[in-house]
Image: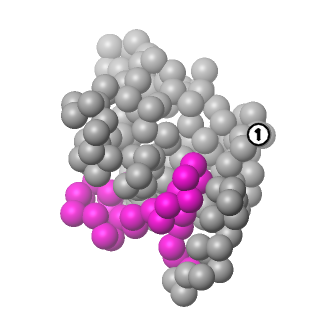
Amino acid sequence: MSIEDVKQSRRTMSEDPTKYVCPRDGSDLVPPSASQRSAYHRNGIHHCETCSGMLLNADAAASSFCSDKLQEMHEGFVEEGTPDDIDCPFCDSQMKVRSFAFQRLDGSLTDPIEIDGCPSCSSFWLDADELHRLSPPSNGGKDAKVEANALAVVLEILLQLPVVFV
């Protein structure tokens, strides 16, 4: 069974229309409200406990700062970006991939990371390995839940910095 088949069957079987599945492995995503980390709720982060990937959505973010930042990032996917092989968990549109860097306080840029963004809605998928490039896993990546919590904190800090398309 393909990932697309798994995603479709979970959507069909689910009685909750707000349940989303991981675009990489088809696992149910943990919603922000089910996390004990406030960073998930403030930034509207759904996460995958299997692969540690993160789904962000501007409308799901409780923080207006984060919501505004995600809307700003979304504009970079409307006309630009390379079509990707995953569909948006929020609206099922084909996502696009773009490289971003974050500008540090001293003006230098972080290493670029690839972010999958939806050109239709303000949703983004971040693979754990992309965030690992900026903050290597402290536990060797063995515990996906612990790793997702650590990456949420890293992401929250990064969202405070200016974003640069590269």
| Label 1 CA crowd tier, 10 Å (few <14, some 14–19, many 20+) | some
Q: Which residues are magenta?
A: 17-43
Of residues 56 and 135, the one nearer the viewer is 135
Residue type for callout 1? Pro
Q: Main secondary structure of the magenta part?
A: loop
The quadrant in which the N terminus is found is: bottom right
Q: Measuring 24% from the left and 59% from the top, which residue is drawn there? A: 38
Residue 108 x %, y %: 40, 12
The quadrant in which the C terminus is found is: top right
How are the residues colored? Answer: one colour
Of residues 82 and 28, the one nearer the viewer is 28
Q: Is residue 61 above or below residue 18?
A: above
Q: Residue 112 in magenta?
A: no
Of residues 132 and 122, the one nearer the viewer is 132
Query: SS class of the residue under badge 1?
Result: strand
Residue 61 in view of the camera: no
- Residue 144 shown left or right of residue 139 in the figure: right
Residue 72 sits in quarter:
top right
Q: Measuring 72% from the left and 41% from the top, which residue is drawn there? A: 84
Which residue extends farthest bottom?
15
- The residue pinned by badge 1 equals 83
Q: Is residue 103 above or below residue 108?
A: below
Q: Measuring 63% from the left and 65% from the top, which residue is drawn there? A: 7
Which residue extends farthest front?
1
Residue 107 sits in quarter:
top left
Q: Is residue 123 above or below residue 16?
A: above
Q: Measuring 62% from the left and 45% from the top, which residue is drawn there? A: 117
Q: Is residue 63 above or below residue 107?
A: below
Residue 74 in view of the camera: yes
